[in-house]
Image (cartoon, rainbow, N blue to C red):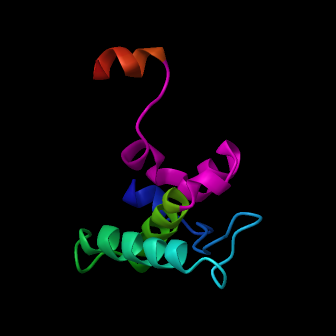
Amino acid sequence: VAAAAARPGTRTDLPWPRGLSAQDDDGLRVSSALAQRDAVAVLPVDAFAPVRLSLARAMHGLVLRHGFSGAELDGIVGPWRAVLVPPSGPAARRRAG
């Protein structure tokens, strides 16, 4: 995952869904910042900066997932999807149940 997150061109911006804004939604802004901080804190101190930024972006997307379409969220979470987003569908429910 880290190798994919470190590839050149990996996006690190923090997009906001249509209808939500960092200026108007303090609770979501703070939740996003805390999720980013906590997730990046588990990475090794010497983790490559793009990896840290990519993980922060993924966590930001997860906090705001209710405002993004599935495709938008996939683009934001990127290579971290397999680690951060539980699988869905009948097979996943059978494993969980």
The answer to whether residue 36 is left or right of residue 77 is left
**Where in the figure is residue 96, as x and y percent of width and height?**
30, 23
Q: Main secondary structure of the magenta part?
A: helix
Please indicate, yes or no, whether residue 56 appears anywhere in the rendered image.
Answer: yes
33 versus 1 height, above or below = below
| Quadrant of image for the C terminus | top left
Q: Position of residue 50 (x, y in %)?
A: 47, 74
Can you tell which quarter of the image residue 14 is in?
bottom right
Q: Does the rendering let one see residue 50?
A: no
Residue at the location (58% across, 69% down)? 8
Residue at the location (50% across, 21% down)? 89
Residue 35: which quarter of the image? Answer: bottom left
Name the spot of residue 26 as percent of width and height, x first.
55, 81
Q: Is residue 95 magenta?
A: no
x, y percentage for residue 3? 41, 59
Q: Residue furthest right?
A: 18
Q: Residue at x 42, y 42 (%)?
A: 82
Residues drawn in magenta = 64-89
From the viewer's side, name the closer residue of 67 and 14: 67
On whether residue 79 falls in the magenta region, the answer is yes
Quadrant assignment, res 46: bottom left
The answer to whether 46 is drawn above or below residue 89 in the figure is below
Q: How many marks?
A: 0
In the displayed structure, 27 sits above or below 6; it is: below
Viewer-proximal residue, 75 or 70? 70
